[in-house]
Amino acid sequence: MKRTEKIVLALLTISFGVLLIVLKGGIISILMTVLGVGLIAFGLVDLLNRTFPPAVIKTVIGAIVILCGWVIVKAVLYVLAAALLIVGILLLYEKIKSKTVCPALWQTICEYAVPVVFLLIGLCLLFNQGNTVEWVFILSGSFTIVEGGLLLVNGLYQD
C-alpha cells in the first residue's frame, strides 16, 4: 500500500471513530443506508451494461437493506464484531509468525498494536449484548481513533 493510501485510510479510520462517539448506534443505520444506495447504484450500472440477473439482485438487496435496515442493525453489529476479531487474530498471527524486527521500538509497538486494537474493538462490539448501549460505541470509537492514530504514524514514518 502506498504512503498516501495509508494516510487516507488512517484519516478515514479516525473519522469513523469520531462518528462512532458522536452518533453512537445511529452510525450503523447510516452505514446501512449508504450500503443500500451503493447496491442500488451498482445494480443500475449492471443494468446499463445489460447484465440483468446481477442488476436485479443488487437492486433488490439494496432496496431491502434501505427499507429493512433498522431491523438488522443488531445483527450487523455482531457480524462486524466477528469480522474485527477474525481480522485481529489473523493479523496478530501473521506478525508473530513472520518474526520481523523493526529498527525502531516505536515501529514494533505500532506493528503489534494494530491487531490488538482490532481485537479490543471487536470485543467491545461483541459485548453489546443486543442493546445499543452508549458506552460500547464510545469505547469502540475511542479504540478506533487510537487505531487510526497508529495507522497514521505507521503511514507517516514508512520507509
Image (tube, grey):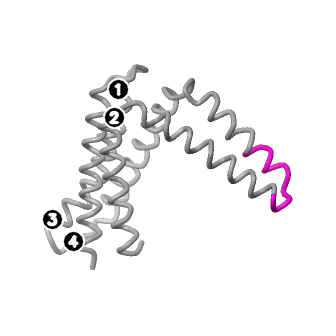
The residue tagged 1 is 127
Give the crowd class for mark 3: few <14, some 14-19, many >=20 residues within 10 Å.
few
**Who's the residue at 17% across and 75% down the image?**
103
Secondary structure of the residue carrying tag 3 is helix
Label 2 to label 1, Cα distance in Å?
6 Å
The residue tagged 4 is 102
Question: Does label 3 or label 2 sit earlier along the sequence?
Answer: 3
Q: Which contiguous range is marked in magenta?
A: 48-58
Label 4 to label 3, Cα distance in Å?
9 Å
Query: How far across and down, in percent of the image, does residue 77 sit?
Result: 46, 32
- For residue 68, the mark is none
The residue tagged 2 is 123
- For residue 106, the mark is 3
**Which one is in front, 90 or 62?**
62
Query: Left or right of 45: which side holds 86?
Result: left
**Who's the residue at 29% across and 61% down the image?**
151
